[in-house]
Image: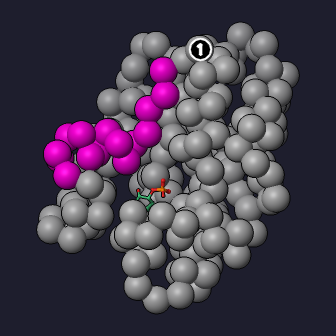
Amino acid sequence: MSKESFERHLVLVGLMGAGKSSAGALCAKRLERKFVDTDHMVEEAAGISVARIFATLGENEFRELERRAVSAASASEVPLVISCGGGVAIDPVNQEALRESGYVVWLDAPIRELAERATRKSGARPLLAEGDPVATLQALAEVRYGAYEAMADLRIDTAGLGVSAVADLIIKAISKGVTG
Ligand code: S3P
């Protein structure tokens, strides 16, 4: 395993439904690292779910809590696996903190597949609660893909792949120290 990639955090970015949390948790287990998820960190800090935060405090407050979660995770001296909520990458402060401390993997898939995966658990994702999830994700993709691309050391197309196969690809890539 490349020393450079191994000592850094493994950071997963991408749109909702990309499989960041499930693949991240599996990678953490295989790498024997602690796994953190920025949404869980935000929920712990606020004491309520992401959906409740959006509904009661609003998206701006959610983004502020999310920035704090990213800052705390990236500052960890122990290398972590960090799964980032889909909107993390659009904030320049988050981008810099994660790029400096982590090896960033962008998990991608066709929009229809993302929409199918992201809507399996209803109510969990406030941005997809109304309207057509495919159209919403398409609009988010247009705004965010540039940021994901700019941040990522590696993009993995997860189309049709299960969690274990995605984790295998990530671990294989960081083992080789792939940087492109
Ligand atoms: C969001 C993605 C969600 C969560 C929140 C907002 C987004 O995380 O942070 O609902 O802006 O794309 P996941 O990408 O883990 O679903």
Image quarter (top left, top right, bottom left or bottom right) of the N terminus: top right
Q: Name which residue type carries label 1.
A: Glu
What predominant SS class does the magenta segment belong to?
Answer: helix
Image quarter (top left, top right, bottom left or bottom right) of the C terminus: top right
Q: In this rendering, would 64 be left or right of 120?
A: left
Residue 156, image x, y percentages: 77, 48
- Front one among 70 and 157: 157
**Residue at image coords 34%, 35%:** 71
| Dot 1: element | loop
Outermost residue on the bottom side: it is 131
Residue 40 falls within the magenta-colored stretch? yes
Magenta region, residue range: 34-48
Quadrant of the rendered structure where residue 104 is?
Answer: top right
**Residue at image coords 80%, 20%:** 175
Residue 133, image x, y percentages: 54, 80
The picture quadrant for ligand 1 comes to bottom left
Q: Is residue 120 above or below residue 39?
A: below
**Residue 51 visible in the current orientation:** yes
**Residue 154 visible in the current orientation:** no
Quadrant of the rendered structure where residue 102 is?
Answer: top right
User: Circle 1 sits on which residue?
Assistant: 32
Q: Is residue 83 above or below residue 161?
A: above
Residue 93, image x, y percentages: 39, 46
Answer few, some or many: residues within 10 Å of disc 1's Cα (few below 14, many 20 plus, some between 14 and 19): few
Q: In this rendering, would 28 be left or right of 59?
A: right
**Residue at image coords 40%, 78%:** 129
Residue 65 falls within the magenta-colored stretch? no
**Residue at image coords 37%, 47%:** 39
Q: In this rendering, would 148 be left or right of 57?
A: right
